[in-house]
Amino acid sequence: MRKPFIAGNWKMNTDSRGAVKLAESIVRDCGDTTDSKVDVAVCPPFVYLQAVAGALSSSPVALGSQDVYFEQKGAFTGEISAAMLKDVGCTYALCGHSERRHVIGEADELINKKVHAAVSGGLLPILCVGELIEERKTNKTAEVVTRQMKKGLAGISEAKMPAITIAYEPVWAIGTGLTATPQQAQEVHALIRKLLAGMFSEKLAEEIRIQYGGSVKPDNAAELMNQQDVDGLLVGGASLKADDFVTIIKASV
Ligand code: PEP
């Protein structure tokens, strides 16, 4: 049995007070839901990580970063290393979020280096994959997701894989209000699990959690989570409202 894993990606939102208040409300409203039934993480902007870590301390809600750089230290202006993220209390790191891929222009090779750096630095990467609307319309979803999986996980050993979560996020569903139907999500999640079985082993594929992301809301969370290969959710907009995020968490157990 894979334990559900719900993560909130706050993107470039909140301010220092708002970030702490949001984290405090999530911790309070989750109550004991998170204790053993579901893993929960929030990914605030880098500058608020430390403040949010304080608000999450002694709670089961974990801290994640929205990105990580692959070098350990040095002349990389503006970048943040895995060691720095560990140092401020991060457990998880998003790698290859669609906005990093398609707004900032990150390629699979760079994302792969970030996945390696996160694992070596003791973080648990969430590798995001997903197709653009043109790719879905031209039946290229499987090809794109296969390429992103193979390139994103290149050189990662089976022994290291349990540290990694995959997030399937169709780009056309992110921040658009368009959610993949549960069947569309299940179809790609099953493909991802099959890819993992081929790249590693059936046993490993059964262990790895695959989150769905793309306009997840309180009213569609349960149906998405009911799909056999949907093990969690990566939530953007709805994670900025404690009520909505906690409703999603509770709908997932
Ligand atoms: C995301 O940021 O990963 C995301 C899925 O955003 P939203 O839930 O707003 O579509």
Image (cartoon, rainbow, N blue to C red):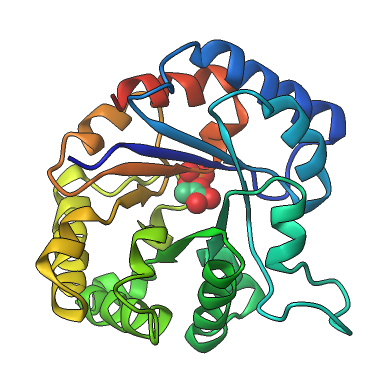
* Image coords of residue 61 (percent x, y): 55, 30
- For image coordinates 86% across by 82% down, the residue present is 74
Dividing the picture into quadrants, the one containing residue 89 is top right
* Image coords of residue 211 (percent x, y): 34, 49
Q: Does 16 sit left or right of 245 as displayed?
A: right
* Image coords of residue 50 (percent x, y): 80, 41
- For image coordinates 50% across by 11% down, the residue present is 31
Position of 62 relative to 37 (above/below): below
Taking depth in this image into account, of 240 and 137 the one nearest to the observer is: 240
Q: Is residue 223 visible?
A: yes
- For image coordinates 40% across by 26% down, the residue present is 248
Position of 52 relative to 71 (above/below): above
Position of 75 relative to 8 (above/below): below
Q: Is residue 175 visible?
A: no
* Quadrant (top left/top right/bottom left/bottom right) for the C terminus: top left
Dividing the picture into quadrants, the one containing residue 168 is bottom left
The mark total stands at 0
Q: Does 247 sit left or right of 95 as displayed?
A: left
Dividing the picture into quadrants, the one containing residue 83 is bottom right
* Image coords of residue 209 (percent x, y): 29, 51
Taking depth in this image into account, of 137 and 192 the one nearest to the observer is: 192
Q: Does 237 sit left or right of 253 as displayed?
A: right
* Quadrant (top left/top right/bottom left/bottom right) for the N terminus: top left
Taking depth in this image into account, of 4 and 133 the one nearest to the observer is: 4
